[in-house]
Amino acid sequence: MTNIAFIGGGNMASCIIGGMLANGFTAQQIRVSDPGEQARDNIQATHGIVATGDNHSAVADADIVILAVKPQVMGPVVSDLASSLNSSCAVVSIAAGIQISDLQNWLGDSQAIVRAMPNTPAMVRQGATGLFANPLITSQHKESIQAIFNAVGIACWVDQESQIDAVTAVSGSGPAYFFLVMEVMQKVAEELGLSAQTAQQLTIQTALGAAQMASSGSLSTAELRQQVTSPGGTTHAAIESFKAGGIENTFREAMSAALNRAEEMSKEFSS
Ligand SMILES: NC(=O)c1ccc[n+]([C@@H]2O[C@H](COP(=O)([O-])OP(=O)(O)OC[C@H]3O[C@@H](n4cnc5c(N)ncnc54)[C@H](OP(=O)(O)O)[C@@H]3O)[C@@H](O)[C@H]2O)c1
């Protein structure tokens, strides 16, 4: 049985634990540590797991340790934990901007480490997580870590750590891009005369339906778009207007801005 310890029992830890318990992991496999009484009470009330305030005891028999604290406190938390870690365990950081080299500085060069970038739809088990491993990660570690993040959506491994910044620009920040598009569609739908409720219902269901069609995988997104775009029709008129407005460049610039900010943040947190 793989034992998994969470350091930090806040929002992200709680949502991953919820997904794990719904997907075959057991409460006996999971340990949680958090200094806050309220966070510990919340973990117990939500998941039936008694959390501790002692990080060292939480990791004592852990095969996988998930660091789910804010990036700002990661250095002191990890440095303090280093001596208690089992040498064969894998350490997974979900903190934005914390690099493998920082974790190695705090944990030493012989620790297996994974950097993960989950996103907020993990809260509804529709998350998308990017994962990067250092060379010390075993295939068994990888399998267990993949199963943990699959419990809250899908997870993809990337080959280079720099690609985690690209993951941040695509799926980390991506939910907000779709929220923005939906927000604008709702606003314009109201301007076109629909009630706020109808505008909201139609927009959300359209986003959901389009995402489900795209995720069925039978056709590419370009093919799906072409399929509903008859020459001279209404959708064609809208798509041509988007293109004339420079939609591709707007997204390229926005996602490049997210990537640049992710790179800057990595430098800010770097020890
Ligand atoms: N939320 C997201 O959508 C998201 C997405 C991707 C990545 N992440 C990453 O996930 C991490 C956690 O985010 P979150 O939203 O779950 O934050 P959160 O709700 O604030 O959870 C962090 C928890 O860690 C606790 N903590 C503080 N110091 C600790 C220590 N020394 N030992 C153990 N626990 C300690 C905090 O307690 P106090 O509140 O008492 O300080 C808090 O309960 C962050 O690094 C973030 O970058 C989050």
Image: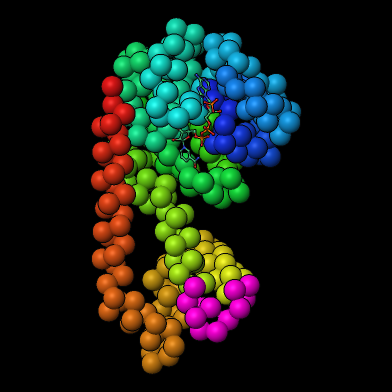
Instruction: State the quadrant of the C terminus.
Output: top left
- Which residue corresponds to the image point at 52% horizontal and 64% vertical from the top-left? 211
- Which residue corresponds to the image point at 35% horizontal and 15% vertical from the top-left? 106
Query: In the image, which residues are magenta?
Result: 187-198
Q: Quadrant of residue 20?
A: top right
- Asked if residue 196 lies in the magenta stretch, the reply is yes
**Residue 172, position as x, y percentages in the image:** 42, 47
The residue lying toward the viewer, choosing from 180 and 14, is 180
User: In the figure, 123 relative to 58: above or below?
Assistant: below
User: In the figure, 22 relative to 227: above or below?
Assistant: above
Spot the residue most to the bottom: 232
**Residue 264, position as x, y percentages in the image:** 26, 38
**Residue 98, position as x, y percentages in the image:** 35, 30
Instruction: State the quadrant of the N terminus.
Output: top right
Total residue callouts: 0
Q: Quadrant of residue 263?
A: top left
Q: Is residue 67 toward the left or the right of residue 3 in the image?
A: left
Q: Is residue 44 toward the left or the right of residue 150 in the image?
A: right
- Which residue corresponds to the image point at 54% horizontal and 36% vertical from the top-left? 12
The residue lying toward the viewer, choosing from 167 and 12, is 12
Q: Is residue 137 visible?
A: no
- Which residue corresponds to the image point at 63% horizontal and 39% vertical from the top-left? 19
- Asked if residue 25 lies in the magenta stretch, the reply is no
Q: Is residue 112 toward the left or the right of residue 45 in the image?
A: left
Q: Quadrant of residue 174?
A: bottom left
User: In the figure, 104 relative to 169: above or below?
Assistant: above
The chosen color scheme is rainbow
The residue lying toward the viewer, choosing from 258 and 146, is 258
- Chief SS of the magenta region: helix
Q: Is residue 183 visible?
A: yes
User: In the figure, 6 relative to 230: above or below?
Assistant: above
